[in-house]
C-alpha cells in the first residue's frame, strides 16, 4: 500500500511495508508505513523534518496516524533504552520493582539540561502496572533486542 503524498505531511524517505515487521502485530497491523518527511505543521519559510506512522483502517487512512519531530523519536528511543536497562539491572532489587522513596531512574544529559527518567508514582495503580509493564517488556524482549542490535550496528557504522 502506497503512503499518500497529497496530505500535509510530505514523505521523503519511506518504509511502505511496515505492517510486515510491526513487532507482535506483524502481518496483521493497521500501521502500514513509516515515513520521514516535511512536517505538516511547517510554517512558510520554516521547515522541520518529522517521522510519521501511517495507519490504515482497511478502508481509509486513519486520523490516528502519528507524526513526531525527529528529536522526539530519538528521545523515545533513549527512554526505551533506559527503561529496558532499568528492568534488566535494577528493578529486581525492590519488592515492588521500584524504590518507593526515590522513583528516579536516571537523568540523561541533553541540550545543557537533562531528561528525567523515573517511575510514575502518581499512577494510583503503579504497583500493578509496573508488574504488567515488566511482563510485557520481557515477553517482547526478542523483538526489542533485535531492533536495538540493529540500531547499535548502524550507529557504530556511522561513527557513534
Image (cartoon, rainbow, N blue to C red):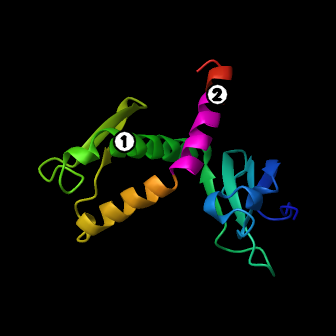
Classify residue 6 as left or right of residue 46. right
Residue at 28%, 68% in the rendered image: 128
Per the picture, the main secondary structure of the magenta-coloured stretch is helix
Q: Residues within 10 Å of mark 1 (few under 14, many from 20)?
A: few
Q: Between residues 41 and 3, which one lies in front from this camera angle?
A: 3
Lower position in the chain sequence, tag 1 or tag 2: 1
Residue at 44%, 45% in the rendered image: 79
- Magenta region, residue range: 141-152
Residue at 20%, 57% in the rendered image: 96
Where is 122 relative to 157, above or below? below
Residue 151: which quarter of the image?
top right
Which residue position holds label 1? 88
Q: Residue furthest left?
A: 101
Q: Is residue 92 magenta?
A: no
Q: Is residue 33 visible?
A: no
Which residue position holds label 2? 153
Task: Give the percent coordinates (x, y) of residue 113.
Answer: 35, 33
The C terminus is located in which quarter? top right
* Foreground label between 1 and 2: 1
Classify residue 128 as left or right of residue 1. left
| Label 2: which secondary element | helix
Where is 124 relative to 141, above or below? below
Amino acid at each position: 500500500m502506497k503512503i499518500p503524498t497529497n496530505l500535509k505531511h510530505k514523505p521523503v524517505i519511506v518504509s511502505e511495508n511496515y505492517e510486515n515487521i510491526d513487532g507482535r502485530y506483524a502481518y496483521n497491523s493497521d500501521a502500514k508505513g513509516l515515513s520521514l518527511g516535511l512536517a505538516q505543521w511547517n510554517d512558510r519559510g520554516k521547515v522541520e523534518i518529522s517521522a510519521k506512522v501511517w495507519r490504515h483502517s482497511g478502508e481509509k487512512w486513519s486520523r490516528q496516524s502519528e507524526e513526531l519531530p525527529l528529536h522526539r523519536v530519538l528521545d523515545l528511543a533513549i527512554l526505551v533504552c533506559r527503561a529496558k536497562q532499568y528492568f534488566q539491572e535494577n528493578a529486581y532489587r525492590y519488592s515492588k520493582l521500584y524504590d518507593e522513596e526515590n522513583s528516579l531512574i536516571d537523568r540523561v544529559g541533553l541540550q545543557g539540561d537533562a531528561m528525567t527518567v523515573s517511575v510514575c508514582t502518581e499512577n494510583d495503580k503503579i504497583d500493578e502496572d509496573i508488574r504488567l509493564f515488566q511482563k510485557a517488556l520481557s515477553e517482547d524482549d526478542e523483538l526489542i533486542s533485535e531492533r536495538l542490535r540493529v540500531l547499535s550496528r548502524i550507529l557504530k557504522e556511522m561513527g557513534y
